[in-house]
Image (cartoon, rainbow, N blue to C red):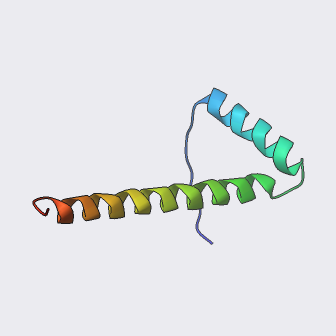
Amino acid sequence: MGKLVITIPDELEQEFRDAVYRRYGMKRGNLTRAVIEALEQWISTVREEIEHQKDSKLNVGRG
Protein backbone atom coordinates (compact mmCIF):
# COMPACT_ATOMS: atom_id res chain seq x y z
CA MET A 1 0.00 0.00 0.00
CA GLY A 2 1.13 3.52 -0.76
CA LYS A 3 1.26 6.28 1.79
CA LEU A 4 0.59 9.99 1.26
CA VAL A 5 1.39 12.66 3.82
CA ILE A 6 -0.50 15.85 3.01
CA THR A 7 -1.34 19.17 4.62
CA ILE A 8 -4.81 20.64 4.08
CA PRO A 9 -6.64 23.60 5.62
CA ASP A 10 -8.13 22.86 9.05
CA GLU A 11 -11.63 23.77 7.93
CA LEU A 12 -11.48 21.40 4.95
CA GLU A 13 -10.22 18.58 7.18
CA GLN A 14 -13.06 19.11 9.65
CA GLU A 15 -15.68 19.25 6.88
CA PHE A 16 -14.27 16.04 5.39
CA ARG A 17 -14.23 14.24 8.74
CA ASP A 18 -17.80 15.36 9.47
CA ALA A 19 -18.98 14.14 6.06
CA VAL A 20 -17.22 10.80 6.51
CA TYR A 21 -18.74 10.29 9.96
CA ARG A 22 -22.23 11.16 8.67
CA ARG A 23 -21.92 8.81 5.70
CA TYR A 24 -20.01 5.86 7.18
CA GLY A 25 -20.01 6.33 10.95
CA MET A 26 -17.08 6.47 13.35
CA LYS A 27 -15.64 3.07 12.46
CA ARG A 28 -11.90 2.50 12.08
CA GLY A 29 -10.78 2.73 8.46
CA ASN A 30 -13.62 4.95 7.27
CA LEU A 31 -11.38 7.99 6.66
CA THR A 32 -9.13 5.84 4.48
CA ARG A 33 -12.16 4.44 2.67
CA ALA A 34 -13.45 7.95 1.95
CA VAL A 35 -10.06 9.27 0.81
CA ILE A 36 -9.71 6.33 -1.61
CA GLU A 37 -13.22 7.00 -2.93
CA ALA A 38 -12.43 10.72 -3.38
CA LEU A 39 -9.12 10.04 -5.15
CA GLU A 40 -10.71 7.50 -7.50
CA GLN A 41 -13.47 9.96 -8.36
CA TRP A 42 -10.97 12.78 -8.96
CA ILE A 43 -8.82 10.58 -11.22
CA SER A 44 -11.89 9.51 -13.20
CA THR A 45 -12.96 13.13 -13.66
CA VAL A 46 -9.50 14.22 -14.81
CA ARG A 47 -9.26 11.32 -17.28
CA GLU A 48 -12.64 12.27 -18.76
CA GLU A 49 -11.55 15.92 -19.08
CA ILE A 50 -8.33 14.89 -20.82
CA GLU A 51 -10.21 12.64 -23.24
CA HIS A 52 -12.67 15.45 -23.96
CA GLN A 53 -9.78 17.83 -24.67
CA LYS A 54 -8.19 15.28 -27.02
CA ASP A 55 -11.49 14.79 -28.84
CA SER A 56 -11.98 18.55 -29.15
CA LYS A 57 -8.50 19.01 -30.62
CA LEU A 58 -9.10 16.22 -33.14
CA ASN A 59 -12.34 17.83 -34.29
CA VAL A 60 -10.83 21.29 -34.85
CA GLY A 61 -10.87 22.10 -38.54
CA ARG A 62 -13.32 19.34 -39.41
CA GLY A 63 -16.78 20.06 -40.60
Residue 4 lies, with reference to residue 6, above or below; the image says below
Instruction: Locate the C terminus by quadrant.
Output: bottom left
- Identify the residue at image location x=71%, y=54%: 34
In the visual, does 28 lie left or right of 60? right
Quarter of the image holding residue 57?
bottom left
- Residue 50 at what x, y percent from top left? 34, 60
Residue 10 lies, with reference to residue 34, above or below; the image says above
In the visual, does 4 lie left or right of 16? left
Instruction: Locate the N terminus by quadrant.
Output: bottom right
Nearer-the-camera pick, 9 or 36: 36
Name of the residue lying farthest toward the bottom: 1
Quarter of the image holding residue 49?
bottom left
- Residue 53 at what x, y percent from top left? 28, 58
- Identify the residue at image location x=58%, y=31%: 9
Nearer-the-camera pick, 47 or 19: 47
- Residue 3 at what x, y percent from top left? 59, 62
Instruction: Count every numbered label the image shows and give the total.
Output: 0
- Residue 15 at what x, y percent from top left? 71, 33
